[in-house]
Amino acid sequence: MAKKKQPKEQDAPALSCAECGILNCYRQSSRFPEFCLTEAVEPSELDEITSHYRGEGIDARIARASAEVEGTYYGKLTRVEEIIAFANRIGAKKIGLATCIGLSEESRIFIKVLKANGLEPYSVICKVGSVDKCEADIPDDLKIQKGTHESMCNPILQARLLNGEKTDLNVIIGLCVGHDSLFIKYSDAPVTTLITKDRLLGHNPAAALYTSGFYYKRLMEEGRNL
């Protein structure tokens, strides 16, 4: 008699670092949980990745500079100052700024700071090229001001212009969600972020998480069609 097939169990959702409360990967002062991603990495793969952080290649220089800034100035410098310290340590002289038009004044202030610290800033604003959104198949009813010329953000052109200037390090100043992704994709130089845009929260997006239990309870509502 044929053996009856057992119903297939649904795969359990994969656990990730978000479910870990031990964080043994930092100090190795405890133990790794059974689902730990560190434990799951093959030693050969980990060795290959770690090799990127050795020597004089750009990955290694960035990793060492980041660690040096963190270890030397932990809790002592603003992010503006950390970017300058990091740029100095990787030998970056020409600093490209990918700037949101809504943060032009902040960009101008940052330019003054960079110049005061011996660096060479070069800024490209997000509306460069002045291409109307309709030319990129964005319907008029998705414009902020309908029935008018409204230029699309142009992060690919921002990246290409900064590539043409041969910048050593590019800094994002408030590019929109998604536009920042495109800029990073097309930038030749390493990219870091000074300001992450959040129009409602004064460019402090973490505030929504801090207040998700009260003011921003809507973040926890299921089925919201955003």
Image (cartoon, rainbow, N blue to C red):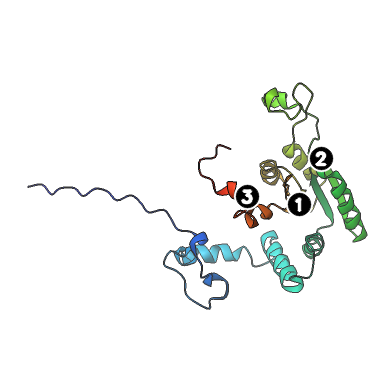
Indicate the quadrant containing the C terminus: top left, top right, bottom left or bottom right: top right
Q: Residue at the location (76% across, 37% down)?
A: 157
The answer to whether marks 3 and 1 mark residues whose Cβ atoms lie closer than 8 Å is no
Determine whether the residue tagged by mark 3 lies in a helix, strand or loop: loop
Measure the C-alpha gap from mark 3 to mark 1. Answer: 22 Å
Q: Nearer the viewer, residue 38 or 90?
A: 38
Q: Position of residue 111 (x, y in %)?
A: 88, 52
Measure the C-alpha gap from mark 1 to mark 2. Answer: 13 Å
Residue at the disc numbered 1:
195
Q: Check the image and name the residue furthest to the bottom.
A: 29
Q: Check the image and name the residue furthest to the front.
A: 214
Determine whether the residue tagged by mark 2 lies in a helix, strand or loop: helix
Q: Position of residue 102 (x, y in %)?
A: 81, 41
Q: How packed is label 1: few (under 14 Cα within 10 Å), some, or many (20 or more)?
A: many
What's the amino acid at mark 1?
Answer: Ile
Residue at the disc numbered 3:
216
Q: Position of residue 163 (x, y in %)?
A: 77, 44
Q: Which mark is residue 135?
A: none
Determine whether the residue tagged by mark 1 lies in a helix, strand or loop: strand
Q: Nearer the viewer, residue 212 or 86?
A: 212
Q: Earlier in the sequence, mark 3 or mark 2?
A: 2
Q: Nearer the viewer, residue 135 or 168?
A: 135
Residue at the disc numbered 2:
101
